[in-house]
Image (tube, grey):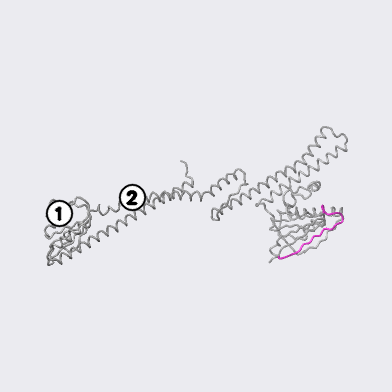
Amino acid sequence: MKKLRIKSKIWISITFISFITIIIGVILTYYLYEKFYLEKQIERLEQQGTLLKKYYYSQTDHDKLHEMIHWTEESTNINVILTEDPMQLSAGIPITGFPDSNLITFKERQQLLSGKEVIIIRDHPTFKRKILAVAVPLFKKKILSGAIFIYQPIDDIYEPFKPLRTFMIIFMVIVLFLLVWIGHKITNYLLKPLKEMENVSKKMAKGDFSEQITVHNKDEIGQLAISLNTMAKSLNEVEMKRNQFLQNVSHELRTPLSYVKGYTEAILEGVYEDPKEINHSLIIIQKETERLIRLVHDLLDLAQLEDDSYPMKKNPIVYSQLISDVINNFDLALKNKQIQVHLTLDEDIIIEGDEDRIAQVLSNLIHNAISYSQNGRDIIIKLSLEDHLSILKIKDHGPGIPKKDLPHIFERFYRVDKARTRNKGGSGLGLSICSQIIKKHSGQIHVESEKEKGTEFTIIIPCFSEIEG
């Protein structure tokens, strides 16, 4: 069985509710109108009976009473029967003019005997139709002497309702049509954004995140559209970064693989016969192989760090000691370039973190500072405490980083000087790895640089909690 769409469900619900509401409203209106109108007619008959009763008691000559009865019948659709023989009202004795039946029932006669007016709404066998009647008792010396029987056919009462019934039926059909039409328009208006979201989500499922939903309102549907637009934008950025990442990886792998393949084929095909040339080719193959190993290692390292579930073995670390140990690993490189490191370290600072990973960040930044510094230029490293945060600054006096490149240097495979960096063996992932490691330690890493004046990296890591207390 085919499931109803939400549009059909809303449309059917609106139609059903509208139809039921109109039906109930029409029936209720008609019923109340009819009830009130019928009560009004009963009141009219009672008033007429009371008036004739007054004439009956006030006149010794009943000719004027009969004239009044005749005038009433002529001027209205009311019929009046006057009987002054109480026996004619008794059960089993027909009234004059109606020999085949009685005018009232025994129960109704008992009401007259008690002095009460009798209201009759029923199919009357005497008149062969449904009537509305009022019987008014007449007394002489506290004895029932007769009655005034005022009646009119129910059909005459309902006659004015025929045009009303027709009008209300036509009105109901028109209103129902309008409600269905308006409901259809409202449904389309409300569901148009959802339909647009459906189309966009289908494109998103196919990998197309470029289209945005037009937001018309700021209601719940509008907020949903904004959320989808935000998600599509984020997914589009992720997709672009993924494509860029694949392009970068393929490019980074292609170059060393081309070298390895080219020199290997040259050696195998005997292009190089001189042992020195063969040895040179093998050195290049080894160098490019090492670069491939570093690249793969860095890629795996970055993938692990970007995983939220990657564990960090955090322990208290004497920060200044770790910095000194890492600098000692670069003694030879510093001597070769005649670079001095000026240290200003607060030895009381203790941080909590993964010592190997923090050392990896320090090694990368110090290695870069040495690599890009000119011979004989100094490197300044300062560690201080500010508001329970450790502030480490590493400043070199190298060529600096152009302003346009500063926002991108922590991106994967981003290189300021691509050719120079690749020749130095870098994979373009070092700073991305540093950024991820610092984030894992609830810290921040910033960079400031000025062309030809050097670059300064700042690492901010919270101090160990016991130090804070």
Q: Nearer the viewer, mark 1 or mark 2?
A: 2
Q: Identify the residue at horizontal 55%, vertical 46% (top origin).
A: 198
Which dot marks residue 350?
Answer: none
Q: Residues within 10 Å of mark 2 (few under 14, many from 20)?
A: few
Q: Residues within 10 Å of mark 1 (few under 14, many from 20)?
A: many
Q: Position of residue 435 (x, y in %)?
A: 72, 54
- Residue type, label 1: Asn
Dot 1 or dot 2: first in sequence order is 1
> Could you tell me which quadrant the C terminus lies in?
bottom right
Answer whether residue 433 is visible to the viewer in this image.
Answer: no
Q: Residue at label 1?
A: 102
Q: Secondary structure at mark 1?
A: loop
Residues in magenta, as a range: 370-387
Left or right: 38, with 408 as reference point? left
Q: Position of residue 396 (x, y in %)?
A: 81, 57
- Residue type, label 2: Thr
| Gap between marks 1 and 2 measured at Cα | 38 Å
In magenta stretch: residue 383: yes
Q: Position of residue 413 (x, y in %)?
A: 74, 48
Which dot marks residue 166?
Answer: 2
Answer whether residue 317 is visible to the viewer in this image.
Answer: yes
